Image: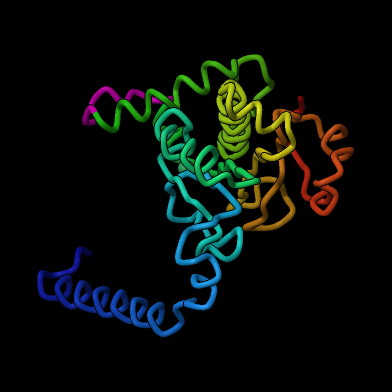
Amino acid sequence: MPASGNEAGVARISIIESIKEDMLAFEKNFPLDSLQRTNFGQEPLITLLTCSDSRVPLYVFGETFNRIFSVENIGNQVKTSEGSILYGLLHLHTPFMLIVGHSDCGALKAAMSDYSGEPGAIARELDNVKKSLHEIQSSAYTLREEPSVKYTQLAELNVDMQVNYMLANTAVARLVEEGSLSIIGIILDLHNVYGQGYGKSYLINHNGVRNLQQLQQIKELKGLAARMQRLTAV
Ligand SMILES: [Zn+2]
């Protein structure tokens, strides 16, 4: 049953109240010492590209303050926010870039359906998602029938494509070759599609390497060896 006008008003007031409390908590715990150490400038370690989906919070990857330069859009697309991403890599020089897709991504589902009725700005961003899926030639892979598995497989292939887009940029590719940048593809499994539990993250790509055996050989990834898994064999 939809809330009455009055109930909805009370709910809105309580949401504002909770936003205020969060603001006050941030002010109280403001990491001034840490900010002073960087002379009040930003020195992030990670450029993070994730889907805007509210079930994919930035804090999955730890402390965010002055550590994560975050870029979020529907379907975690490089082409939608390329300038922001390049700013993190080429100007802030983050040594890592994480590209994160997830199970049950609405953007992937929308991109594979008829979205011609969407407002132009939404359609243009969905065009980017559609193009990514097309370019990775998802039809060349064996996708399972079960929708939850199929769309998570597509989320993997979509992340792969975003890594490829990054590596196609000459300046970015040079950083990777020099060893000063690692681009890591991750899937956040919110729905236990991989069968190992809810909310687990899996490493699926490192600088374009997708084969699990090859990933296991990469020195800097040793700590994540147990988290290398793919639904779509490559
Ligand atoms: Zn999504």
Describe residue 225's horizontal placement relative to residue 98 as left or right.
Answer: right
Q: Magenta residues? A: 112-120
| Residue 154 drawn at (x, y percent) | 58, 30
Q: Could you tell me which quadrant the C terminus lies in? A: top right
Q: 104 and 96: which one is in front? A: 96
Is 203 covered by the magenta stretch? Answer: no
Choose between 86 and 192: the one closer to the eye: 86
Give the side of residue 113 with respect to residue 67, left or right.
left
Whether 121 is drawn above or below 89: the answer is above
Question: Where does the image place residue 140, in percent across and percent down from the top left?
Answer: 66, 14
State the image coordinates of residue 218 (x, y, percent, origin top left).
85, 39
Question: Who is closer to the viewer here, 64 or 189?
Answer: 64
Colouring convention used in this rendered image of the protein? rainbow
Q: Main secondary structure of the magenta part?
A: loop
Q: Residue furthest bottom?
A: 28
Q: Residue at the spot x=76%, y=28% of the render?
A: 233
Which of the image's four quarters has the N terminus?
A: bottom left
Q: Position of residue 96 (x, y in %)?
A: 64, 45
Camera-side residue of 76 and 15: 76
Residue at image point 87% right, 34% down: 213
Task: Give me the residue at 59% from left, 15% from top.
Answer: 137
Is 10 drawn above or below residue 138 in the view shown? Answer: below
Within the image, what quadrant is residue 8 found in?
bottom left
In the displayed image of the protein, which residue is found farthest to the left? 5
The answer to whether residue 145 of the structure is visible from this angle is: no
